[in-house]
Structures are given as structure tokens and as C-alpha cells.
């Protein structure tokens, strides 16, 4: 797979996911009418994914009422998103290829793996981007209730599972402190 210019939709989609924590199925079929420019938020009320046992793709309700939510669109994302939708009709799909074709999750994940390879980053899937959002938000001391709501979790208990990544990050920081102190100790002696 080669990275193509027209795959800018996927880059924007992944950026949206990283900055909002939405599921990729919620983003894939997101329409302009669900974006509120005045309040800088997006209404998440449906998803685009597998709708029956044959694997047919289409719009479906979200699994729980907690998943139906309004998510904040961060300032860094607003300009990119608003320029993208300014000439769209209300029912246009924001991140569609050629304004109508919705990318498959497999293609999105292949694209993301290619980006990770190109940037020499650990391999990630679109779901990893959601976990990354949660981890960054929690590590930045954003209230767990706010993070839980942004992710569409029914309880903060679901959100707490991302805390294990923070524990791992803290352990790495302790290793850096030990390394620094060893170097400092050698210099002082």
C-alpha cells in the first residue's frame, strides 16, 4: 500500500480520533450536520460498521445510550475540520473518499501501520489511537469523569483500565530518574 494524496481523509479521520477519543466506527460515517461549529463539538449518535451477520456495512445505532454523546472538538482540530466541511452539505460524510466512499476499517488500519513505519513509531491500530487519547488525557490530569464522557463509557470503571498505561509511563520515569542520579553520583564522586 502506498500513501496517496487522496488519503488525506484518513489522516484527518485519525487526527479526529486521536484528539476526541471517538471510536473509528463513530467517525467513519460522521456527517456535517452533526458538527456544531458555534459550540465546537460533535454529536455522536450513530456508527458506520457491520450491521448483520453477512458482514454488510451500513449505519447502525450505537450499542448503549452512554455512547450517544456530544464530544468536544479541540482547538487544534477545529481549523482543519471546519475548512474540510465548509463547502459540504449537511448530509455529506466528512471523512469519505471521493465524497461518498467510506473507508474500511482494514484499510484505515493498514494506512495507520504505514504511517507508524514511516515515522518509526510503534505499530498501532485505530483502536490504539482511542487508547492513546484516553492515556494522554488521564496522564494530563483531566478529570476521569470528563474523559469517561468523551469516550462514551457508562462508568468511570471502564475508563480506569487506561490507568495501567499511566503506571507503565510512571515506571519508565522512575528509571530515568535512577539513570540521572547514577550519572550525577559519578560526577560528584
Image (spheres, rainbow, N blue to C red):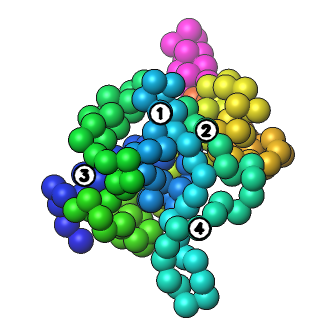
Task: Give me the C-alpha separation between circle 1 and circle 3.
Answer: 22 Å
Task: Give me the C-alpha separation between circle 4 and circle 2.
Answer: 17 Å
Task: Give me the C-alpha separation between circle 2 and circle 1.
Answer: 10 Å
Name which residue lies at 27% across and 37% down: 86
| Image-based side of 91 in relation to 126, left or right | left
Q: Is residue 90 above or below residue 99?
A: above
| Image-based side of 92 in relation to 25, left or right | left
Name which residue lies at 24% across and 41% down: 87
**Residue 59 on the magenta segment:** no
The quadrant where residue 118 appears: bottom left
Q: Earlier in the sequence, mark 4 or mark 3?
A: 3
- Residue on which the image places disc 2: 70
- Residue on which the image places disc 3: 8
Magenta-tinted stretch: 177-189
- Residue 95 appearing in the image: no
The quadrant where residue 76 appears: top left
Q: Is residue 102 above or below residue 54?
A: above
Q: Dot 3: within a 10 Å radius of its alpha carbon, few (fewer than 14), some, or many (20 or more) residues?
A: some
Give SS at disc 4: strand
| Residue extending farthest front | 90
The quadrant where residue 105 appears: bottom left
**Residue 185 on the magenta segment:** yes
> Is mark 4 in CB contact (under 8 Å) with mark 2?
no
- Residue on which the image places disc 4: 60
Q: Earlier in the sequence, mark 3 or mark 2?
A: 3
Q: Dot 4: within a 10 Å radius of its alpha carbon, few (fewer than 14), some, or many (20 or more) residues?
A: some
What is the number of the mark on residue 36? Answer: 1
Q: Earlier in the sequence, mark 4 or mark 2?
A: 4
Q: Earlier in the sequence, mark 1 or mark 3?
A: 3
Name which residue lies at 67% across and 49% down: 68
89 or 111, which lies in front? 89
Quarter of the image containing the N terminus?
bottom left
Amino acid at each position: 500500500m502506498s500513501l496517496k494524496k487522496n488519503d488525506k481523509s484518513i489522516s484527518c479521520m485519525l487526527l479526529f480520533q486521536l484528539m476526541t477519543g471517538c471510536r473509528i466506527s463513530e467517525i467513519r460515517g460522521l456527517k456535517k450536520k452533526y458538527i456544531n461549529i458555534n459550540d465546537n463539538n460533535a454529536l455522536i449518535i450513530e456508527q458506520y460498521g457491520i450491521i448483520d451477520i453477512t458482514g454488510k456495512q451500513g449505519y447502525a445505532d450505537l450499542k448503549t445510550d452512554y455512547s450517544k454523546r456530544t464530544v468536544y472538538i479541540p482547538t487544534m482540530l477545529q481549523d482543519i475540520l471546519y475548512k474540510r466541511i465548509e463547502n459540504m452539505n449537511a448530509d455529506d460524510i466528512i471523512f469519505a473518499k471521493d465524497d461518498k466512499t467510506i473507508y474500511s476499517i482494514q484499510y484505515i488500519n493498514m494506512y495507520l501501520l504505514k504511517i507508524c513505519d514511516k515515522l518509526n513509531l510503534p505499530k498501532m491500530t485505530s483502536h490504539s489511537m482511542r487508547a492513546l487519547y484516553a492515556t494522554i488525557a488521564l496522564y494530563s490530569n483531566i478529570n476521569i469523569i470528563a474523559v469517561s464522557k468523551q469516550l462514551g463509557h457508562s462508568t468511570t470503571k471502564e475508563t480506569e483500565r487506561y490507568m495501567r498505561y499511566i503506571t507503565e509511563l510512571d515506571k519508565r520515569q522512575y528509571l530515568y530518574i535512577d539513570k540521572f542520579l547514577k550519572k550525577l553520583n559519578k560526577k560528584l564522586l
